Amino acid sequence: MPDMPLWKYCTTAHYLEFLISLQLFGDTDWCAEKQISCLYTISNDVNAHYQRTTIFKT
């Protein structure tokens, strides 16, 4: 995202704070470091954590 003006002046801390603010894990008692670690793990091996599914119209 380095070429996007919105993120031009953001630091790594800003990125991490933004990701935590999205509350992707819902209401959890996990610390910020554990949440970021989990997101990092999932994003590095998407095929192991997700599967492609087709939903047909009825």
Image: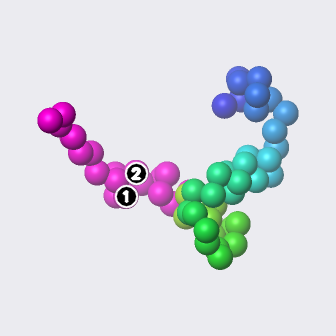
Q: Which residue is mark 2?
A: 46
Check the image and report above or below for 47 versus 26. Answer: above
Disc 2 residue type (three-letter)? Val
Q: Given contact means CB atoms under 8 Å apart, are the residues at marks 2 and 1 in contact?
A: yes
Q: Secondary structure at mark 2?
A: helix
Q: Residue furthest right?
A: 9
Closer to the camera in the image, 52 or 41: 52
Extreme residue toward the left, this view: 58
Name the residue at 61% across, 72% down: 28
Mark 1: amino acid: His
The residue that label 1 is drawn on is: 49
Graded by Cα atoms within 10 Å as few (under 14), some (14 to 19) or many (20 or more), the crowding at tag 2 reads few
At horizontal 18% and vertical 34% (from top left) the residue drawn is 57
What is the x, y in percent for residue 35? 62, 65
Q: Is residue 41 visible?
A: yes
Q: Residue 39 placed where, x, y %?
A: 55, 58
Query: In the picture, which quadrant includes the C terminus?
Result: top left
Residue pictured at 42% horizontal, 54% vertical: 45
Within the image, what quadrant is residue 20 found in?
Answer: bottom right
Query: Few, some or many C-alpha atoms within 10 Å of disc 1 (few <14, some 14-19, many ≥20)?
Result: few
Q: Does 48 lie within the magenta span?
A: yes
The secondary structure type at the circle numbered 1 is helix
Q: Quadrant of the N terminus?
A: top right
Pinpoint residue 54: horizontal percent, then vertical percent: 21, 40
Which range is magenta?
Answer: 40-58
Q: Position of residue 8 (x, y in %)?
A: 80, 29
